[in-house]
Image (spheres, rainbow, N blue to C red):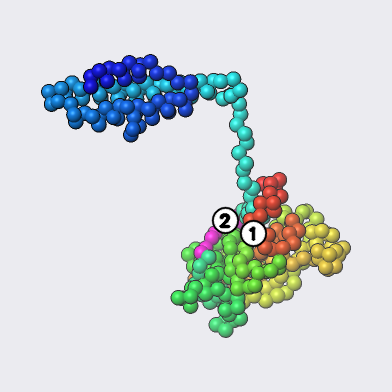
Amino acid sequence: MLERIQKIMAEIQALQAHNAEEAEALRIKYLSKKGEITALMNDFRTVPAELKKEVGMRINALKAAAQDKINALKEAAVQEQASAPGIDLTRTPYPIPLGTRHPLTIVKNEIVDIFSRLGFTLAEGPEVEDDWHVYSSMNFADDHPARDMQDTFFVEAHPDIILRSHTSSVQARVMESTQPPIRVICPGRVYRNEAISARAHCFFHQVEGLYVDRNVSFTDLKQVLLLFAQEMFGPDTKIRLRPSYFPFTEPSAEMDVSCTICGGKGCSLCKGAGWLEILGCGMVDPAVLEANGIDSSVYTGYAFGMGIERIANLKYQVRDLRMFSENDVRFLDEFVAAN
Ligand code: DAH
């Protein structure tokens, strides 16, 4: 036994390897389950008791020596490979292909950025909401058609819990927890029970704006929206407000911008009208202020809401709404330059 140990020790000391594979082969030869040193250890039980102590110490020393030697060979092989001609460790690495920002994120950031510069702060609310924040507190009558199954996704077990169908719910969230002055911009995803097509989707994105303070007037609203339109679509952009109706604003209006393609002359994008509708807005209905704990005899406010897809379409002429959610990299890669 001692002789076998000595013989293997001599072998180990003389070991050489030209590369990492050879060093690994040596590890297998000596140290793996079926390796020679492992075999020695298995035979240890046949060693007479009086020799066990000495033999044991030697086998352990042999094993340690083999491990050290083979590790050293492996290390040397790696070093050698690294310094071999043709491998330049100082070379700059290949560029890592970075993703691109999603066009809706680009547009959302742009909208939020414009309103931040006007003093609006960011507010967000949950996508799974209750009826109160989405509809009741926003002055929707109990039998308002928007509450219908055809528009609203209900969470089955709770008829009161729904997927929000507009970001106006965030207005309620902010007002119930903050007293004026309030000036917030609220981007987020909304859901409606619509058949998916090029022009409609069951989810899309909106940005809501809300300003409540003393003496807030329709003139303030109009001025802020004009500034927004000119920042978003260019300094020559004109706006026009048409009377409209929303349960949560009175008076209410829809805003058009002069066509982003023809500038107002009439083209296929604006269908000859020269104008494109981009958002809804109005003075916050006093009933909404009161429902959310704000004294409507002291404060007034304005609100507006717009679809991010709509704005993105006007900026980038995306023909099919589905492209925004299909994650086709050929489409997404087109927005690299806009990052
Ligand atoms: N919530 C409306 C919608 O989903 C958009 C909207 C219109 C929001 C007028 C407003 C507003 O804040 O004043 O179509």
Q: Which residue is mark 2?
A: 121
First reached walking from the N terminus: tag 1 or tag 2: 2
Quarter of the figure with residue 29: top left
Q: Which mark is residue 271?
A: none
Q: Which residues are magenta?
A: 119-126
Residue at image point 32% right, 27% down:
36
Distance, label 1 to label 2, CA atoms, is 31 Å
In the depicted view, which residue is nearer to us: 222 or 111?
Answer: 111
- Disc 2 residue type (three-letter): Thr
Dot 1: within a 10 Å radius of its alpha carbon, few (fewer than 14), some, or many (20 or more) residues? few
Q: Which residue is mark 1?
A: 326
Question: Magenta segment: does it hold 77?
Answer: no
Residue 321 placement, left or right of 40: right
Place of residue 190 in the rendered image (x, y in percent of width and height, measured from the top left): 59, 66
Place of residue 3 in the rendered image (x, y in percent of width and height, measured from the top left): 25, 18
- Disc 1 residue type (three-letter): Glu
Q: Main secondary structure of the magenta part?
A: loop
Residue 285 visible within the image: no
